Amino acid sequence: MAGPFRLAPNEVQSQIPTWALGKETVVIVDCEADGLFEMTAGGSPSETTSVKAGSNELSRNFGGVLLAVKNLTNGDLTVTTV
């Protein structure tokens, strides 16, 4: 588990660890407001996802890379990887 990392609107957090050896990673995004969330795993293209106020879980098939995330909502959010 890495985090939680707290991000203000439009803030970027990089160097977030994911699971090693290609295991699926769950990214938990706890939001104060509905909006968009952007993440980039390693050298992959960025992915923008809609998130709702409250807890959002995003399961992705990546691991062993560092994750960068950007808060595109109008409120603070926290990001945790498990």
Image: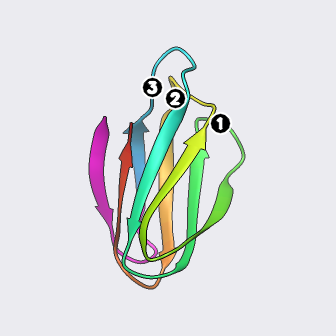
Q: Position of residue 13 (x, y in %)?
A: 40, 55
Question: Compared with residue 53, is residue 28 higher up or lower down, i.e. above or below?
Answer: above
Which of the pair 59/66 is nearer the observer? 59
Whichever of labels 1 and 3 marks the residue nearer the N terminus, that label is 3
Q: Which residue is mark 1?
A: 43
Residue 6 painted magenta: yes
Label 1 with label 3: CB-CB less than 8 Å:
no
Q: Which residue is mark 3?
A: 19
Q: Which residue is mark 2?
A: 65
Q: Quadrant of residue 43?
A: top right
Label 2 with label 1: CB-CB less than 8 Å:
yes
Q: Residue at x 67, y 52 (%)?
A: 46
Alpha carbon separation for disc pair 1 and 3: 16 Å
Residue 57's disc number: none
Whichever of labels 2 and 1 marks the residue nearer the N terminus, that label is 1
Q: Residue furthest right?
A: 45
Amino acid type, residue under disc 1 in the picture: Gly
